[in-house]
Image (cartoon, grey):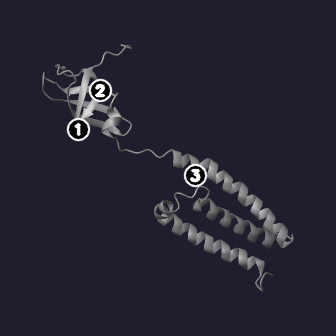
Amino acid sequence: MLFGVDIQTIYLVTLIVAGCITVLYILFSDLLDGVVEGVVFFNPAVILAFITITSACGYLLEQFSSMTSLIVFIISSIISAILSSLLYFFILVPLRSAEVSLVYTEQSLEGQIGRVIVPIPVDGFGEVVIETVSGIISKRATGFDNEAINHDEEVLIIEVKDGTLHVKEYNSPFK
């Protein structure tokens, strides 16, 4: 008994409440992550997992063992700390670092290799296609030194100005 309530009931109510909060967190995690982004050691998913696992282990140990409530709480906390640490280091950290943005900037195209799909005339514009991790990008291009570049030539993107790629023919050393 704790505060006049059976300890099993406390574990069960805590489990249900933590489970409901976890479901709400899953639904609204983007909002909450933005609010607590600056706090270094505060990860709501790990804290909720710790509380849920502790209450589940505590309930089961209280129900099916004859250990004292203090020992049950200590064992439940240790099990929960181990499982929450595994969740954090082997699931949440890799997921967070695996986020890949499909967005590119024009400056990120500089230095990349592309292929001419519409020939570039002297002092004119053509079109270059660049293959990136986010897909294929097609952009207007002109010769860096106003030179003509034929269809299907590989080009090196020197700079990007006003949405136009300034390119030079690229002679790969591996051909």
Determine the residue positioned at 71% across, 60% down.
Answer: 80
In the rendered structure, which disc, 3 or 1, sits on the residue that comes first in sequence? Answer: 3
**Left or right: 51 in relation to 152:** right
Other-residue count near label 3 (Cα within 10 Å), few / some / many at <14 / 14–19 / ≥20: some
Per the model, the C-alpha gap separating discs 2 and 1 is 13 Å
Other-residue count near label 2 (Cα within 10 Å), few / some / many at <14 / 14–19 / ≥20: some
Disc 1 marks which residue? 163
**Left or right: 152 in relation to 109:** left
**Left or right: 57 in relation to 140:** right
Name the element at disc 1.
loop
Per the model, the C-alpha gap separating discs 3 and 1 is 38 Å
Per the model, the C-alpha gap separating discs 2 and 3 is 39 Å
Determine the residue positioned at 20% across, 21% down.
Answer: 145
Disc 2 marks which residue? 158
Q: Are marks 3 and 1 in contact (CB under 8 Å)?
A: no
Residue 150 lies in quadrant: top left
Disc 3 marks which residue? 92
Give the image location of residue 159, x and y in percent.
28, 30
Residue type at the position of mark 3: Leu
Residue 175 lies in quadrant: top left
Determine the residue positioned at 29% across, 26% down.
Answer: 158
Name the element at disc 3.
helix
**Left or right: 18 in relation to 26:** right
The N terminus lies in quadrant: bottom right
Residue type at the position of mark 1: Gly
Q: Are marks 2 and 1 in contact (CB under 8 Å)?
A: no
